[in-house]
Amino acid sequence: MRFNSSKCYVMHISSGRSTTHFNYKLGGQTLQTVHSYPYLGIHLQDNLKWDTQVAHATTKASRVLGLIKRNLSNCTEQLKATAYTSLVRPHLEYATPAWDPHLQKHCSQLERVQRNAARFVTHNYSKTEGTVTKLLHDLHWMSLQNRRSASRLTLLYKINQNLIDIPKENFLKPVTLQGLRRMNTQNFQQPACRINAYKYSFFPRTIKEWNMLPEGTVNASSINSFKHNLHFD
């Protein structure tokens, strides 16, 4: 296999303020250093943050929402809601178990798209405080932040049940100490985390939430049952 050096890049990944950079060559050509690059549809940054990914997701979703607004403005509320959940929201939720942001500014940036969609679907542009919150409740739209949490928990359920090809023994260590207060009998050891990039990554973050789930949820007999218990139907 031969690589095209013009399509290869170097990224120095670190959570620190300063890093040691090296030049790399391929076929005699020095590779370009980048601070962000899309990989499998997710924009990775060299500082382990998600600013670029959140901006990309919201921009793409907003563009599609704008298209829907221009073409479905006279359609029924149900049709407009279906258009949002099937054409817009997937851009906000693509592969979120891998990049679910924890900073409030990123969460608000994503939620803003859904709140905008709620106004369009219901044709309610009132500026009264609490209007959009009520619209979301009436539409039965869970917050995107809660949906991302449910999505992560569902993936962990699949891993724990050996439904996908991720070896759980490498990541899920059962709690063995006696006398600890547990919400369920399938608690896993919480990984020690030194930096936020790891603390809020998939396994440390989701294990913490998993350990707080009730017994009936973690022992659900099927994925649909598990999602139902999370109100993530």
Image: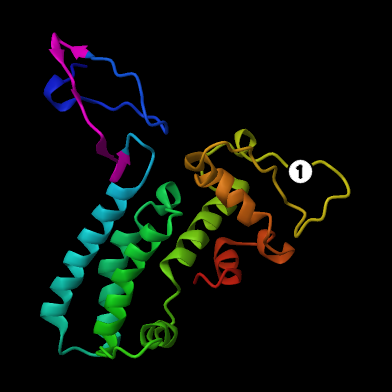
Q: Which x, y percent locates residue 107?
A: 39, 61
Residue drawn at (58%, 44%) of the image: 204
Q: In the image, is residue 93 above or below residue 161? A: below
Q: Which residue bears the numbered disc 1?
A: 175
Magenta residues (range): 25-44
Residue drawn at (28%, 45%) of the image: 41
Asked if residue 136 lies in the magenta stretch, the reply is no
Residue 25 at least partly seen: yes
Residue 4 at least partly seen: no
Q: Nearer the viewer, residue 72 or 38?
A: 38
Q: Which x, y percent locates residue 130?
A: 41, 86
**Type of secondary structure dominating the magenta stretch:** strand
| Secondary structure of the residue carrying numbered label 1 | loop
Residue drawn at (15%, 90%) of the image: 74
Q: Nearer the viewer, residue 86 or 69?
A: 69
Left or right: residue 172 versus residue 88 is: right
Left or right: residue 213 versus residue 65 is: right
Q: In the image, is residue 62 above or below residue 35? A: below
Q: In the image, is residue 229 above or below residue 133? A: above
Q: In the image, is residue 117 above or below residue 54? A: below
Q: Tell me the quadrant of the picture where the N terminus can be found.
A: top left
State which quadrant residue 226 falls in.
Answer: bottom right
